Image (tube, coloured by chain):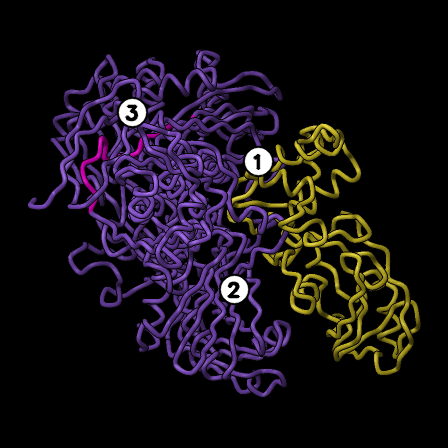
Amino acid sequence: MAGDTKFTVKAGLPQAPRTMDVNAAEGDLKPWDLDRLPEFREVGKPHPRLEGPQKVTGRAKYTQDVMLPGMLHGRMVGATIPAGEIVSIDISKAEALPGVRAVWKTDSKLIRFAGQDIAAVVAISPDVARDAARLVRVLTKSKPFTVELKDAMKAGAPLVFSEAESPAGRDVPKKGNVVGPKQGRREGGRGDVDKGFAEADTTVENTYYLPVHTHCALETHGVVASWEDDQLTVYASTQGVFAVREGLAEALGIDRKNVRVITEHMGGGFGAKLGPSASGSSFAVVACRLAKKAGAPVKMMLDRAQEHLCTGNAPSALMTVKIGAKKDGTIVALGFTSYGSAGIATGAGTSGPAGALYKNNPNFTSEEYDVFTNAGPAAPLRAPGHPQGAFALESAIDELADALAIDPLLLRRKNESSPVRAAQYDVGAKAIGWERRNKKKGPAIVSAGKVRGIGMANGNWYVFAQDSGISAQVKIHRDGSVEVFSGAQDIGTGFRTAMAVIAAEELGIDPMTIAVRVGDTRFPEGPGSGGSVTTNSVAPIVRAAANKAMTQLFERVAPVLSATPAELVARDGNIFVASAPSRSMTFKAAAGRMAGEVIDALADRKRQFATFRDDIAGMQFAEVEVDTGTGEVRILKMVSVNDCGFPVNPLTAENQVIGAMIQGASWALLENRIIDKNVGVMVNPNLESYKIFSPSDMFEARSILTPVANLGNNTSTAGLGEPPLVPSLAAIANAVANAIGTRVRELPITPDRVLAALASARRRG
Amino acid sequence: MSLPPPPPPSDDDPKLRVTRRNFLKTASAGAVATSVVGMVAGAPTGGAAVLGPGAVPLTLEVNGAVKKISVEPRVTLLDALRDNLGLTGAKPACDRGACGACTVLLDGEPIASCMMLAADAEGRKITTVEGLGTPEAMSPLQAAFVECDALQCGFCTPGFVVAGTALLNRNPDPSLAEIKAGLAGNLCRCGTYGRIFEAVSEAAKAQRAPAKRP
């Protein structure tokens, strides 16, 4: 394009560099590449997170901690039946309770899941609000309901939506509660699978299942809403302050300029906090309305049960994988079919990994079906659909390896299309000790003994970025202090610190001295933190803004150092002439020479350009111990090997990788949303019977990041939040199969399922 | 975590007598079993301190300072600390003692402050995460959490810091198994457990050999 800037760069893996020409937008900076990698002063080095001292001393203020003068406390009231008609909602008793300041009730006439918004109250204390919530009287007429995936698929199952009401697209086939088939979202199909299966020497076909999981962020959804005339300020526990601003302005019919959203610290989201309220509740809109009505700020935090019921979940998945291969292991056909329930929402597809991995296979097809149930709508949960899809696909790959009597790692390597993943196999195999894996087949015959197994699985993700409509700002003050501004929020990933590191690299100063201001719609617009986009969307503009600011400072001090600005270098808190380092001054002294009080530079995001790879490669290895007497599975060790372009701050990045792996382990062994079929209500909406991984479950966890000069933006950063959850479930399932010689195809792998699998394998002989 | 002993009896103020309606909300946790009979029969018969139903004055000793507050007897220690004293380090996350985010020290022992009434904490020494250190002067364990990056979103972190402090107070040289056991009542959804174990272990080392610290 006219005005493009062409750069020739060294891309790819450090051990196999490749020269690439990229066309960046006009004015973009030369991308950091493999030549730059060894010269980084701050990027790629470990940096403790900037807000750490605030968080470990209890001073960090989350939405849950916001206290405003005169603030009232709100409480949502949810439906207690899974399906029915609302006959009446009587709020008079609640309104009459002393201390109650305002009450809201829904206009909706239909209930489609237990937990759906019915009413809300605000009162002078959380306890009075709870009393008032109990006084809301709801008269309903119950209707038949269906809450389980397999039941909802049956002919004659109670309909969650009539055809006219269905939220699925008009052109998608519908049959009862089942919607589809839809072609896999991202990869579609290729080749001719029937021909492929006809040519295959060996074909395996199996079905895998996993239930619904919930996000379980420790801070529940919530807001504090405060009006001053027509100006609305909202503190929100959100992954997207700008999405909250947009959503609330639209719902309330006000100008978005009159809405300010603030998220200084937030207690976890994992995908459920991307919208203005939540996928199954309008609590934030209600809180704003009630704050207006009551004439006082309102804090509306959901409780733990509500968090499970109406703020999203990861869909269940029932997946059938059919793979055909030649005797030597070459995959020649792959068919993937998935049914899943996102409750009353759509979006349960899981075919991403099947379409993206093993691309050398010419014949692939996928079909995805959404099945409606009377349960809360799903929300994205860390690589939506991918941990589920990889569980099925990568279990099936191991089953194919068994059928072919080929080592499963060799089978994957043989079919590998990514040079990055090809390099990762050796790294991971060495770290787990792959050669110790059981080579014998068949069920473990030891009675009441402990057996060990090792397994691995691949995962995939994509290079997503928001590459327009966002900007960042860097200020150098006269006293030498530096501020970085991005409206995007730090949801616990270390985004704040990563931006300090990027700016520090460009300014030649210590990142720990930079103040990074994030999570406020008054700052330059940033992306929502979903899809693993935050760092790689914002890093290139922080770099650009810092570069702009530094250029201005160089112009100011170049004459003093008897040099041109182009001859100056900033490093270790000094500015000096590249050819004569003794001609130098400190960054602080240079700042003191600026004309005004501040150098203020703003940079807009420029478009993405060519990447080395358009996917993010990762794999995980697991070693487990299974007690064949009790069926208990313990994970001993897991290794993640992951690419994220250039890691900005490995200390926080590896923390995130290991955290995702633990979440995956938690899904694989423990987590299960259970809805009572008879009453249609979740029986474990808490943290003691909805089990998540605890310290006592913890294993030895290792993260290995493999840097790749991936380009796409001027910092070669890529996403990391989601990919490390993708392979975990399958890696653990494969390790369990390697330990006990038979396979559990349903998650979570609980003791009863292990014992049933062993018993069934013994019967088969 | 052990159940704390019942609180000392407070003044027998007739205004504070229990009503049938409020009994379950106001009976002190340590004295429920004995007072039920008395309540049903009529006036309370001693043993249980009877408060409420309206706001009552309480004196709490928090982080070494004596604080006077006025709260309804049903208010939990967690809510009193957060809403009445502005100490928001301890977090509400599960509201039923399952996650440990609200952990504080009561006479040095870690307890779930969401599971205790504020009134039952009178006369006890309460330490919250704020009392262990400040951003400028962190405790060795807090500093180790930052150094090891033993946190992500940080919402569970105050609970882990308090539980870890209690563990190190009673066992200055814990093994990995002992660290896991000592923190078993706390949950972290971001998955920072391994780093937390490392931080506790590093802080233990630092506390055992303070002279060797840089």
Q: Which residue is mark 3?
A: A420
Q: Chain of mark 1?
A: B
Most distant residue in the left direction: A2
- Amino acid carrying mark 1 in the image: Cys
Q: Nearer the viewer, mark 1 or mark 3?
A: 1
Find residue A302 and name its label.
Answer: 2
On screen, residue B114 above or below A229: above
Q: Which stretch appears magenta?
A: A607-620
Percent of width and height locating residue A415: 25, 21
Q: In which quadrant of the rendered view does residue A88 lie? A: bottom left
Q: Which residue is mark 1?
A: B148
Left or right for A227, reference A466: right
**Chain painted in purple in the figure:** A
Evaluate if marks 1 and 3 touch, with contact meaning CB atoms under 8 Å apart.
Answer: no
Q: Nearer the viewer, residue A717 or B120?
A: A717
Percent of width and height locating residue A682: 50, 57
Left or right for A573, reference A254: right
Q: Chain of mark 3?
A: A
Element at label 3? helix
Mark 2 vs mark 3: tell me if same chain. Answer: yes
- Confirm whether residue A349 shows in the render: no
Percent of width and height locating residue A166: 26, 63
On screen, residue A132 above or below A219: below
Task: Indicate whether residue A191 is drawn in magenta.
Answer: no
Task: Indicate whether residue A617 is drawn in magenta.
Answer: yes
Q: Earlier in the sequence, mark 2 or mark 3?
A: 2
